[in-house]
Amino acid sequence: MKRILLVSHSHFATGTKNAIELLLGKQNNLFAIAAYEDNSDIELVLNDFMDNSNYEQTLVLTDLFGGSVNTFVSKYLSESVFVVAGYNLALVLDLLLKEEPFSNESIRASIQQAQNAIKFMNDEVSKNEQENTFF
């Protein structure tokens, strides 16, 4: 079994989890930690989470490359723990919908797909107006 942990500064992680569950329903393998929202030590919270697992694989998605949350989480990297910095909703959806185990290749493919989903709508609308199409 595999699990995904969203970790962010403040409520980005919990908000993302709520949005995912609005779209897909309850996800038993999706977890969220909102760092720095109370007096909890983020390192202790992460240690607790990482140490208490019945899962074969863990994918941790953090909000910001090089940020404190990303730095804390990166120490857990291993063959069964993957870390991605700078997630968006499209990435989380894609990763959750994949049934196969996580691999470096599948995670890279999901990242590429999520990056391609980011659009500057001013350009998209302008391009589509010229072509008389939209979406």
Image (cartoon, rainbow, N blue to C red):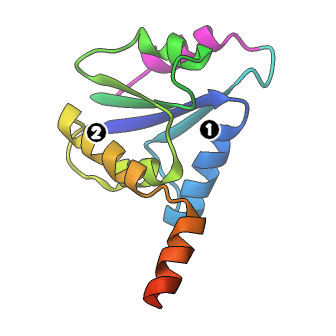
Question: From the viewer's perspective, is 35 left or right of 91?
Answer: right
Which residue appears at 73% of the width and 30% of the height?
Answer: 10
Q: Position of residue 22 (x, y in %)?
A: 60, 63
Quadrant for residue 109, please give it: top left
The span picked out in magenta is: 40-55
Q: Is residue 63 left or right of residue 73?
A: right
- Local secondary structure at mark 2: helix
Of all residues shown, which one is farthest toward the bottom? 132
Residue that mark 2 sits on: 107
**Badge 1 amino acid:** Ala
Residue visible at 54% across and 55% down?
A: 20
How far apart are labels 2 and 1 at the CA level? 19 Å
Label 1 CA crowd tier, 10 Å (few <14, some 14–19, many 20+): many
Looking at the picture, does residue 125 appear above or below residue 94?
below
- Of all residues, the one furthest to the right in this rendering is 38
Q: Indicate yes or no whether the magenta region holds residue 121.
A: no
Q: Tell which of 59 and 91 is nearer to you.
A: 91
The quarter of the picture where the N terminus appears is: top left
Residue picked out by circle 1: 13
Give the left or right position of residue 116, taking residue 6 as reference: left
Label 1 element class = helix
Whether residue 55 is visible, yes or no, is no
Please, is residue 20 above or below residue 123 in the view? above
Foreground residue among 21 and 132: 132
Q: Main secondary structure of the magenta part?
A: helix
Mark 2 or 1: in front is 2
Query: In the image, residue 82 lies at what x, y percent?
Result: 33, 25
